């Protein structure tokens, strides 16, 4: 399945194929879409190949198509399906792709397998590695093997860069390009206050603390609920929002019941557009055990929401404790509880943190400054191919 305008290698444009294994509109996927839209279209044509499951709709394919970007739904039965390899090869050949840019375990592996036979330049962006179980660790090892055979690797944070170096990728083939957002899309004045609250039956004066992300062990939502439970009992207006879905949902619902706060916790499921929630949040609590460079922190700050976050991954490259937000130790329930109390109890102080945080996002993490950095790598890859 293909949509969008075809590439035009004959007229001098460089055709770049991004590969992504997802059905969700999440941080890495948004980065691909915004890169395609911000690229110099006189010089670059972007194609997006999305790995899909036969017979199932794919929200990410639809999101790419809606932005007018050429998208190829590459259907597989499961995992490293040989037909998936053939489909990627077909797209590269038929669309005269010069650069393949992978974004996750499976696309890294496929890129390394097919690229030597096709003479294309290769790169990957490492958005983060999640080690929840033995299978995840196996995927990471396979991805690291693949990365060692690619022409260039981009890390989304300095902490991610250090991990990639330890995996054996030479420093000369490694760059850092932070995630970024299109700030104009995250202006609170463009969203009516109270829409989210009304949609879930909350009172206008409810104090809303949100955790946005997949409901999965690495996101630390169990710690979030445990840390917030006592304060929730003491502050009748406080409500906790878990925005996302995932394998931990049933366990988290049971935990909320066990803690006696089930009536104070709202499970929204996956939100395609999280901005109405940001508009009504009093605080974002990111309690992850691991992150790459979390877009949710950038988005929340740009929407004027104070941020409490665990000091993991590239978070400290956005949040300076006490200046642009509050940092706590991952898994430390006491620290999270104390920070929640401080921020909920001092709305003026929290707003000041958010204001300085927004200024940092606008100065350092606006998308318009990110795309030229990626295009510079494209130019380097092509020069190296021709030398």
Image (cartoon, rainbow, N blue to C red):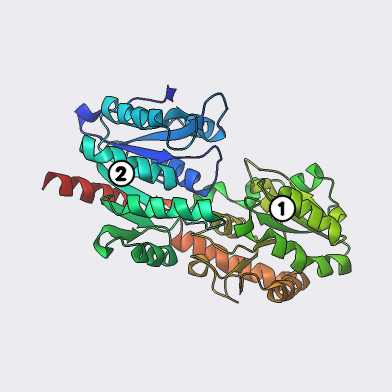
In the displayed structure image, the side of residue 386 where residue 128 appears, left or right: right
Task: Give the structural element (helix, strand or loop) at label 2.
Answer: helix
In the displayed structure image, the side of residue 105 where residue 330 appears, left or right: right
| Residue 112 in sight in this render | yes
Q: Residue at x 30, y 54 (%)?
A: 148
Q: Disc 2 designates what residue?
A: 112
Given residues 341 and 263, the one toward you in this image is 263
The numbered dot on residue 151 is: none
Proximity of marks 2 and 1: CB atoms separated by less than 8 Å: no
In the displayed structure image, the side of residue 236 where residue 54 appears, left or right: left
Given residues 359 and 321, the one toward you in this image is 321
Q: Disc 1 designates what residue?
A: 242
Q: Residue at x 54, y 68 (%)?
A: 312
Q: Earlier in the sequence, mark 2 or mark 1?
A: 2
Q: Residue at x 39, y 28 (%)?
A: 83
Task: Give the structural element (helix, strand or loop) at label 1.
Answer: strand
| Residue 304 in sight in this render | no
Query: In which quadrant is the N terminus drawn?
Result: top left
Quarter location, residue 220 = bottom right
Name the spot of residue 217 as percent of width and height, x first: 63, 57
Mark 1 crowdedness (10 Å alpha carbons): few <14, some 14-19, many ≥20: many
Name the spot of residue 50 as percent of width and height, x first: 45, 34
Farthest residue toward the front? Answer: 134
Given residues 334 and 16, the one toward you in this image is 334
Name the spot of residue 123 as percent of width and height, x first: 31, 48
Name the spot of residue 223 as percent of width and height, x first: 70, 65
Residue 147 vertical placement versus 324 (above, below): above
Q: Residue at x 28, y 24 (%)?
A: 94
Farthest residue toward the left? Answer: 387
């Amino acid at each position: 399945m293909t949509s969008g305008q075809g590439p035009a290698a004959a007229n001098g444009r460089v055709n770049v194929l991004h590969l992504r294994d997802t059905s969700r509109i999440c941080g890495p996927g948004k980065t691909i879409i915004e890169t395609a839209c911000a690229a110099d279209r006189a010089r670059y044509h972007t194609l997006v190949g999305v790995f899909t499951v036969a017979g199932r709709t794919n929200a990410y394919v639809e999101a790419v198509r809606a932005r007018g970007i050429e998208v190829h739904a590459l259907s597989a039965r499961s995992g490293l399906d040989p037909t998936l390899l053939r489909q990627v090869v077909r797209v590269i050949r038929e669309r005269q792709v010069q650069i393949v840019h992978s974004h996750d375990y499976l696309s890294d592996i496929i890129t390394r397998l097919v690229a030597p036979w096709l003479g294309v330049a290769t790169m990957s962006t490492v958005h983060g590695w999640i080690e929840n179980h033995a299978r995840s660790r196996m995927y990471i090892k396979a991805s690291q093997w693949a990365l060692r055979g690619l022409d260039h690797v981009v890390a989304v944070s300095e902490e991610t860069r250090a991990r990639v170096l330890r995996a054996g990728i030479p420093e000369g083939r490694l760059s850092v390009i932070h995630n970024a957002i299109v700030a104009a899309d995250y202006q609170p004045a463009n969203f009516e206050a109270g829409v989210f609250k009304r949609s879930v039956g909350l009172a206008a004066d409810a104090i809303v603390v949100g955790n946005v992300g997949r409901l999965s062990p690495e996101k630390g939502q169990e710690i979030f609920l445990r840390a917030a439970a006592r304060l929730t009992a003491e502050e009748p207006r406080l409500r906790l929002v878990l925005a996302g879905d995932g394998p931990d949902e049933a366990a988290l619902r049971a935990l909320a019941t066990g803690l006696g706060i089930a009536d104070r916790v709202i499970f929204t499921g996956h939100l395609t557009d999280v901005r109405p929630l940001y508009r009504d949040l009093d605080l974002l609590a990111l309690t992850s055990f691991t992150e790459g460079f979390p877009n949710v922190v950038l988005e929340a700050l740009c929407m004027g929401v104070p941020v409490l976050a665990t000091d993991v991954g590239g978070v400290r490259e956005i949040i300076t404790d006490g200046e642009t937000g509050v940092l706590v130790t991952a898994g430390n329930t006491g620290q999270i509880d104390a920070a929640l109390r401080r921020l909920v109890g001092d709305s003026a102080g929290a707003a000041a943190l958010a204001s300085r945080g927004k200024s940092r996002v606008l100065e350092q993490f606006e998308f318009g400054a990110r795309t030229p950095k990626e295009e510079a790598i494209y130019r380097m890859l092509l020069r190296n191919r021709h030398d």
